[in-house]
Amino acid sequence: MFWTEKIFKTKKPIIGMCHLQPLPNDPLFDTTKGINFIIEKARNDINTLQNEGINGILFSNEFSYPYSQKVAQVTVATMARVLGELKNQIKIPYGVDCMYDAFSTIDLAIATDANFYRITLHQAELYDYEFGITQLGELIRYITLNKLKAKNIINIDSSVSLSISNKNVNELIISIITKAFPDYLSISATTIDKLLLHEDDQFFKIFKQINLICDGACNTENITKILDYTNGIIVGTALKENQQRSNPINSMNVKKIVNIVNKY
């Protein structure tokens, strides 16, 4: 049994993104609206996701771009405050992600009693042994040292696949599994589509042997196909009004995706 089944009580969980509004130290942070505005926006999204039957929530500082590998302390502290103030309203498993700061993500997971956390690998520093995190050895030791109960999701950013030839994606996935020890590996629907076009069935036997979740570019048109190869989905923009990232989560969009997955 995959850990997601134990946590979410279903074989193919849907994890909905709660994209926090720009936070202190972010270029787009609105000082006039302040932190209470961030909290209320998150509260509304949490209620919509839970009311429509989503299985889990992943909180991220989505609007902290341009992202940094070292998130400001005030940004992490604000994320912890938001979760602290809203925790009594969260009735389903939840996770955290400080984009793209793996160490701060782990600290936030500890501070908020998160069930899981996501670390994203990205194109800018993708080396044979580094995977976009230049202190990978220290990171794995940091996870071990803290004896985290929270499970980790290591995500390969969809842009990474653009810089790697298809014959190397196989090697990359195996390398991540053997060196980074992810509880779950996640890749986008776009990457899965590319692999389906260029790889034979033998390649996807590897997918059947790992804990794989689709993270990014999931929508009502491709979810059924995606679930043939993965053990769940993380979905964000497809849940928003008019499928625009900056908009609030729309209850009808959540309901559509939940219904499709429940019928799978």
Image (cartoon, rainbow, N blue to C red):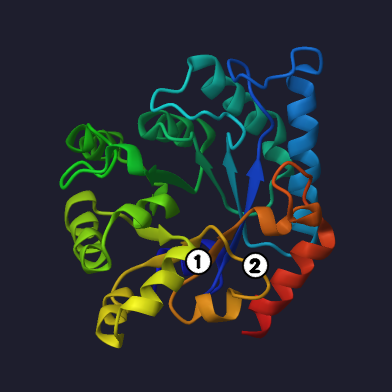
Q: Position of residue 75 (x, y in %)?
A: 55, 21
Q: Is residue 207 left or right of residue 72?
A: left
**Which quadrant of the view contains residue 40?**
top right
Q: Is residue 36 left or right of residue 118?
A: right
Q: Is residue 122 left or right of residue 59?
A: left
Tell me what residue is drawn at x 74 percent, y 18 percent. Answer: 30
**Which quadrant of the view contains residue 235?**
bottom right
Dot label at residue 219: 2
136 shown above or below 7: above
158 shown above or below 40: below
Classed neighbour count for the residue bearing mark 2: other residues with Cα under 10 Å, few (<14), some (14–19), many (≥20): many
112 shown above or below 248: above
- Callout 1 amino acid: Ala
- Callout 2 amino acid: Asn
Q: Is residue 74 left or right of residue 178?
A: right
Precedes in sequence: disc 2 or disc 1: 1
- Quickly name the residue at label 1: 189
Circles 2 and 1 in contact, beta carbons < 8 Å: yes
At mark 2, the secondary structure is: loop
Residue in front for this viewpoint, 20 or 200: 200
Residue in front for this viewpoint, 4 or 60: 60
Tell me the distance, in whole angstroms, between the alpha carbons under discs 2 and 1. 9 Å
The quarter of the image holding the C terminus is: bottom right
Q: Residue furthest top?
A: 31
Tell me what residue is drawn at x 23 percent, y 67 percent. Answer: 170
Q: Position of residue 117 (x, y in %)?
A: 45, 45
255 shown above or below 121: below
Residue in front for this viewpoint, 5 or 170: 170
At mark 1, the secondary structure is: helix
